[in-house]
Image (spheres, rainbow, N blue to C red):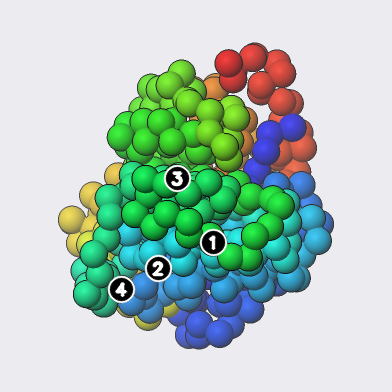
Amino acid sequence: MATMNILDQSPITHGSDAATALKQTVELAKIVDRLSFKRFWVSEHHNSTSLAGSAPEILVSTLAANTQRIRIGSGGVMLPHYSAYKVAESFRVLEGLYGGRIDLGIGHGFGGSPLSTNALRESKVVPSYAEQIDDLQVYLTDSVPASHRFPGLVASPSVRTVPEMWLLGLSVGSAELAAAKGISFTYGYAMTSTPTTDILALYRDSFKPSQIHRRPQYSLAISVVCADTEPEAEDLARAVELYMVWTVTGKRRFGLPTVSMAQDYQYSQAEFEARDRLRKGMIVGDPQSVKDQIQSLRDLYQVDEFVCLSNITHFEARVRNFELLSQIASEMGNYVESKSAVR
């Protein structure tokens, strides 16, 4: 079967509130823990009126406490905002509590506006992203060298296991960095919709084993809207499209639009063009159609693990979306075994 994962951003539905969105994230994790998903990740967004997930490490702790099987992680911590030492200690606490189930996904984007970025990095001297990744690895493995800026430093608590470390990226540079540092890599197809097949091939071929990962491990992040029927999926997708258009055009709205709001919305020409462009990166349809579209991406990228982002406004429809995706994953044969994609 294909490996399906979830990236949840705790979306706030128009007319609802952030507390409800966070509770729905917890409820969703409990539901999918009983399904075939391998990982449940939460994102980091600041200064947002539509996404409630601003502190992934806190959500990870709550989600892990409310689930039994599924791996829980960040997708991801925006590392340049923070001290790598503090991030290492936070995730060591999580690993100590829920050993073998924690993923530490990292990124270097803003996760918000320039205003929130300035507030997060106020009065800080931030090392380079590559140096921060090195720091995280030596802190998590108790291997700080004598030549380090802080020789002898230990990230407490000391635990026997290490969280899986993932770099989330959109470019060749990100793939090269993940391969050079020996950590897992997720390519954000959902954010680019650009078929750059050489990115994952480059990562596989240039991967250098590290103390945390001995072999390459990679996934593709996709935006999915699946429903029992094609018309229902299209209706749900209209609301997702409108939210994405608002995001890329800088329009600040409180909450994700409902389906009825999206149906009544009058797009400007610029917004219509943005919607058309963004739709190309989405997977929308009934189960058979979605299965076919995922299979096409699977063949194109030679990848067997997917991270599914589904910012569907209505919670019940979002849950049904993931129930259907779980069934689709079970129906899809293992690509690695059938086509020997990973070398």
Note whether residue 120 is visible. yes
Alpha carbons under labels 1 and 4: distance apart: 22 Å
Residue 203 higher or lower than 264, as above or below? above
- In the rendered structure, are the residues bearing label 1 and label 3 in contact, judged by CB atoms less than 8 Å apart? no
Alpha carbons under labels 2 and 3: distance apart: 34 Å
Alpha carbons under labels 4 and 3: distance apart: 29 Å
The amino acid type, in three-letter code, at marker 4 is Leu
Q: Quadrant of residue 94?
A: bottom right
Alpha carbons under labels 2 and 4: distance apart: 12 Å
- Per the image, the residue denoted by label 4 is 120
- Disc nearest the viewer among 4 and 3: 3
- Disc nearest the viewer among 1 and 4: 1
Q: Position of residue 228 (x, y in %)?
A: 68, 51
In the drawing, does residue 31 fall left or right of residue 199?
right
Note whether residue 235 is visible. no
What label sits on residue 145 in the rendered view? 3
What label sits on residue 330 in the rendered view? none
Residues 113 and 315: in front is 113
Alpha carbons under labels 1 and 3: distance apart: 13 Å
Residue depicted at 27% across the width and 60% down the height = 126
- In the rendered structure, are the residues bearing label 2 and label 3 in contact, judged by CB atoms less than 8 Å apart? no
- In the rendered structure, are the residues bearing label 2 and label 4 in contact, judged by CB atoms less than 8 Å apart? no
Mark 1 surroundings within 10 Å by alpha-carbon count, few (fewer than 14), some (14 through 19), many (20 or more): many
- Disc nearest the viewer among 2 and 3: 3
- Per the image, the residue denoted by label 1 is 155
On-image quarter of the N terminus: top right
Q: Earlier in the sequence, mark 4 or mark 3?
A: 4
Residue depicted at 50% across the width and 85% down the height = 17
Residues 220 and 143: in front is 143
Mark 4 surroundings within 10 Å by alpha-carbon count, few (fewer than 14), some (14 through 19), many (20 or more): some
- Per the image, the residue denoted by label 2 is 45
In the drawing, does residue 24 fall left or right of residue 238?
right
